[in-house]
Amino acid sequence: MISTSSARSGSRISAGIWLAFWLLAATGSRLLTSGEFELQQTLHPPLTSGGLLLLGADTFGRPLLTLVPRASFGSLLFGTAALALSLVVCISYGILAAFAPRWIQTLFAQFLELLIGIPGLILALAIGAIQGPGWSTLLAALILGILPGTARLVQARTRELLLEDYVTAARALGAGRMHITLKHLLRGLAPVITAKLPGLFAHCLLAEATLSFLGVGAPLGSETWGALLAQGRDYLLEAPQIAFLGGIPLVLTLLAVQTLGDEQRRS
Amino acid sequence: MKRILRSTLSGLLSLLLIYLASRLMIRALPGDPASALLEHMEANIPVEEVRKEYHLDLPWQVALGKDLGALTRGDLGRSLHSRKPVVDELRPRIARTLELAIPALALSLVIGMTLGIHSALKPAGTGTLLIRLATALATALPAPWIGPMLAWLLGVRLGWVSPSGGWALPCILISIGLSAYWTRLIESRVRGAFSAGIESHALRAARARGLPEWKILLKYGLAPASPALLAVLGTQTGSLLAGSFIAEVLFDWPGLGSAFVDAVLKRDYPMVEACVFITGAAAIAGTRLGDLLQRSVDPRTRNSNAFAGEEK
């Protein structure tokens, strides 16, 4: 038993170290490098010259040594922003649904039921068809993909919280809905949401990579994981290092987030 | 019987809603839908023809009515690009997708059963630890990365399979994530059912008779868990298709998924609408079918209100 628990703490520590290291590297590369490119360096092979070109270059001649962390920064930034925004939407939806009259509750629930039935990828493609590819499509797809599960959870927990004695007491003292929401509900919802955070964050990162890869997310050539992977696939024969190096940080980050999430669930 | 009828009816209602929602996509286009449709087309199609063909000259209620009528005749309109009926274009594509998805699902179920039951049987063994590591890794491997890596390693370097267009690579890619999912699920469900029944007289009697532990696990763990697993199998139809779509695009497999993504990128709206409807309908039908199967196999769930697969 000792060995499994020490293995667990070991994996937790290495996950933390990786995340800290890579966040630093990504932010540093964004701040310190300019992202300029030279087309003469297009598809420069790796390990043939030193300096910035040590790992080779992509199709636009951007050195992979700086491009990979820069792309990570773009994806992580987008993932964080998208997660924050979807949480705001999900929590508002869930709380509104819990306060609403019966028939609106049914309507809200039916909408979620319909969404849950359709795979997120299909929704994303449909949105991509209407809006055209781009960041807003990616964001809308993420929010609609996260909404059913999270909003249901929020609504269920809110209903429980509304039956708590202290909420009843606050109501009896004349507290309004706004006050109860801000003072009691949000605080009561925090543990439930926190438990879901790692999974949702991993989902955001994965969705960005997949949708940008398919061509409905971030535009080609932008500095994100998905765009890098899309390029890597197109030049797999000439420059396999683009696909390989572009994906490694994503895999490690997903693993780290997943490990920390498992750990949090256990404790 | 009443319950089956109700479940079928609400399933049909969802199908109808999906169809209507997919039909309203064209109308959701910014500006004049008919000219928006043609904006990205190379072919020269008169605006008036498009407006008439997609009933954009009619109020939306009337147009939806006409579309519903067309649906009952199995008509989903014509593609803006090829000008051929969408149904004829998509039928061979669906067959190609199933060619991938069904073997991948079967393979994953076999792997999931074997590894999951092994882990449930020996929770503390070294094999189980390895299985757990492998499933954790497999769920963290994004398809757009591991797909090209497999193509490069197995296709280019080792030359075992053809790097693009072949059947093996997409099938393996779909199976990786799916196997990990089923291994985890089967392990936890089997162990849950087993520990729920561990105090029962039947199980203790079986042990006392000296039956091997794996036989006991199959009978008192897998058997009671399998109806719920059937229901999950149904709810997973949608994600099976989604996984297969990504693999199709990755490896140039001419299935429904690559038709879908192509249509999205080319703005071929009638095709997109049909793909949304077909995939959504398959996902909903899968969920309902799994639910029905579970109810018919497991009498305990017949009187419960909640859909077993949707509770989690």
Image (cartoon, helix red, strand yellow):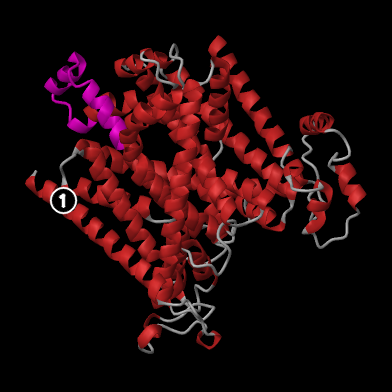
Residue B254 point in image, percent of width and height? 63, 56
Residue B195 point in image, percent of width and height? 21, 25
User: Against B83, is B203 above or below?
Assistant: above
Q: Nearer the viewer, residue A62 or A83?
A: A83
> Measuring 38% from the left and 89% from the top, which residue is drawn there?
A49
Quarter of the figure with residue A216: bottom right
Task: Classify residue B268 as left or right of residue B193.
Answer: right
Residue B49 point in image, percent of width and height? 91, 48
> Measuring 57% from the left and 20% from the top, which residue is drawn there?
A104
Residue B233 in view in this figure? no
Find numbered disc 1 in the image and state the secondary structure of the residue it sits on: helix
Point out the stretch of residues depicted in magenta: B187-215
Residue A28 point in image, percent of width and height? 35, 71
Task: Classify residue B177 as left or right of residue A231.
Answer: left
- What secondary structure prevails in the magenta region? helix
User: Against B116, is A61 above or below?
Assistant: below
Residue A23 in view in this figure? yes
Q: Residue furthest left?
A: A2
> Measuring 58% from the left and 47% from the top, which residue is drawn there?
A124
Q: Is residue B103 magenta?
A: no
The residue that disc 1 covers is A9
Tell me the quadrant of the picture where the N terminus of chain B can be found.
top right
